[in-house]
Amino acid sequence: MRRFICLAASLTLQASVALAQDAPAEAENPVAKRHYTFHELFFDEQDGKLDVSNYLAKGGLVPIPIIITEPAVDQGLGFVAQFISWPDGTKDTLTRRMLGGARTGNGSYGYGYFQSGTVLDGRLNYKFGLGQGELTIAAYPGGLAIPVEYTTTFDYGVFGSVLWELPDSRFSIGPLIDIRKTETRLSLPASLPVIAPDLTRTLKTAALGIGLHFDNRDNPLTPTKGANVYLNAKFNDGTFGSDRDFQVYDLEGYYFSSFAPRWRYGARLAVNAVRGDTPFNVMPAIDTRGVPSNRYQGETILNTEFEVTRELGDRWSVLGFVAAGRADAGDSRFFKDSGFIYSGGAGLRYRIARKLGLDAGMDVAIGPEDTIVYFQFGHAWSRGMD
């Protein structure tokens, strides 16, 4: 449910940040120009090519379609309406409000509300969201090729963070919350004893945690240099109202640079782990291009990707990428170690918003089981980055 909203918002969430942060001089500041003709909204005034910088810069209501190509949920469509406002054109006054939803081919759906902004002259950044939904997806017990399909109904989900920017640094730190009420059932009448305690019952999880983040990317949309690193730790405990005591840890790092004119690269390293009495459907999974969602799960997941991009001109670029992931089952009796899972592929990008540095395009990824096509707005890692 939360993933649907995050996928839908990936374009407008980061676009509004790019508009407001590190704005160039008045003549180039897309926020400074308040009135546009229809042609100016969708075509660049410099080269006359298709460009949506001014359309996103005008703020107000920005409708965004969702295109889900994930085979694990049989693709899908949706819609997000976002309202952007920033009175003086700086990130210190930027507020984003989004309402949207999506539905997939296998009947999964999700809808919700998300808001982010700043207070205290931009030093305190907040995000929160809430929603409902239902997700039908498969697990692969014991690493077998035969899937076990299950459905999780989210009666509600609430998540949020408040991060304080440390003075004279790119670091921020603050508390996190994640509260959910769910019910999980197998699509098959047979039951598996090892996960029986997680099925056909209402389960409430409630976590408090802390996040430490670092970000010095030149652009949150399609970064060309800099790093984004964060450590999040969330603790589900009966003290907070959780029915299960378990912990969720996420350590992720992204780095971008170049090695020659018109050649740039990016690297990603992520470690996602759970410990304690973790419900089977909360277990993390390998999450790289070319690997279906939820295919390889375990208590500790390692994801790595490396990407090289060649700029063909001011608008077009091509890229190639390789990825490797590993799932360690740990103490889980439902999953088993996956070993290293490899994938790779190529993509094509078009700079759809020059002033924002936003690329859009398509990737074709070849994995161990299938070939998967992804439509991208911003970087392919945008959903994972801070």
Image (cartoon, rainbow, N blue to C red):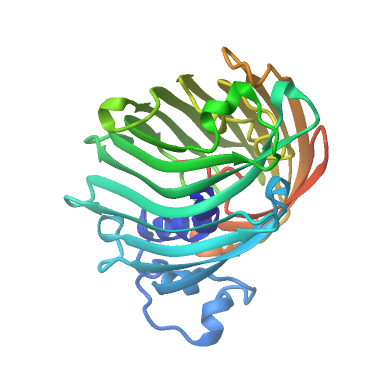
Foreground residue among 385 and 152? 152
Is 60 left, or right, of 154 in this rendering? left
View extreme (bottom): residue: 37
Foreground residue among 150 and 312? 150
Quadrant in the picture for residue 166: top left
Up-down relation of residue 27 to residue 270 (above or below): below
Image quarter of the C terminus: top left
In this view of the protein, can residue 129 be seen by the observer? yes
> What residue lies at 51% left-to-right and 69% top-to-bottom?
53
> What residue lies at 69% left-to-right and 44% top-to-bottom?
309
Up-down relation of residue 60 to residue 249 (above or below): below
View extreme (top): residue: 331
In this view of the protein, can residue 219 be seen by the observer? no
Is 298 left, or right, of 239 in this rendering? right
Question: Residue 225: percent from the left, percent from the top?
Answer: 52, 40
View extreme (left): residue: 120
Is 111 left, or right, of 107 in this rendering? left
Question: Residue 220: percent from the left, percent from the top?
Answer: 47, 48
> What residue lies at 77% left-to-right and 36% top-to-bottom?
344
View extreme (front): residue: 189
> What residue lies at 46% left-to-right and 45% top-to-bottom?
218
